[in-house]
Amino acid sequence: MIPHALVMAIDALWGWTLSAFGQPLLIELLDHRQWKAVEVFDGLILPRLWVSYVVVLSTQLVWVMLVSPRQLQSRSLRQLWWLGCGISLASALTVQVQLNLPGSASILLLAAQLMDVTLLYWLSTALLTPSAKRRGVIPGWG
């Protein structure tokens, strides 16, 4: 029960941090005219961020609910974990496809997306996977 609460707390804290600090900074980096920057953020970036978030959450749920409870060999579990990680990374990287953003805004957006993958996929799957299956399957967990 504690890992579930911890994952929800981390997700909520990360979402609050992005809303409170990341979004205003990104809007400032997008354009000096705030109305135009807000228009770009709300019209182009935010829908893509939501799709990426849903993909990462879906891969996390597939791992936790369908894959990790099954009795599979360690090699198969590792391959499925990396498949989910690859899907999450691909969705994070496609957020910036065909967006003409200034360099600093692009880097900030990419950093936020990579932190999403780290916090929402890697850490949450590690915390919600039984420790016996976590060893040797999820990188960084023994």
Image (spheres, rainbow, N blue to C red):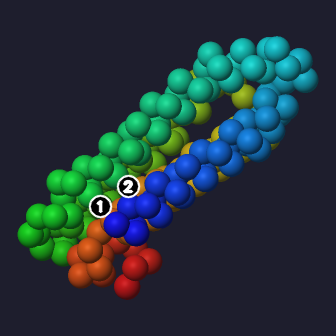
Residue 97 picture quarter: top right
Work out which residue is located at the far right of the displayed protein and give it: 32
- Horizontal and vertical percent position of residue 70: 11, 64
Give the residue displayed 25% in from the left and 50% down from the top. 62
Reply above or below: 4 against 99. Answer: below
Along the line of sight, the residue nearer the viewer: 140 or 42: 42
Q: Residue at x 52, y 52 (%)?
A: 11
Q: State the residue position of label 1.
A: 81
Secondary-structure class at tag 1? helix
Q: How far apart are marks 1 and 2 (CA)?
A: 6 Å
107 to the left or right of 57: right
> What quarter of the picture does the N terminus occupy?
bottom left
Q: Which residue is drawn at 79% across and 29% down?
A: 27
| Res. 5 image quadrant | bottom left
Q: Is residue 82 visible?
A: yes
Residue 32: x and y, percent? 90, 23
The local secondary structure at tag 2 comes to: helix
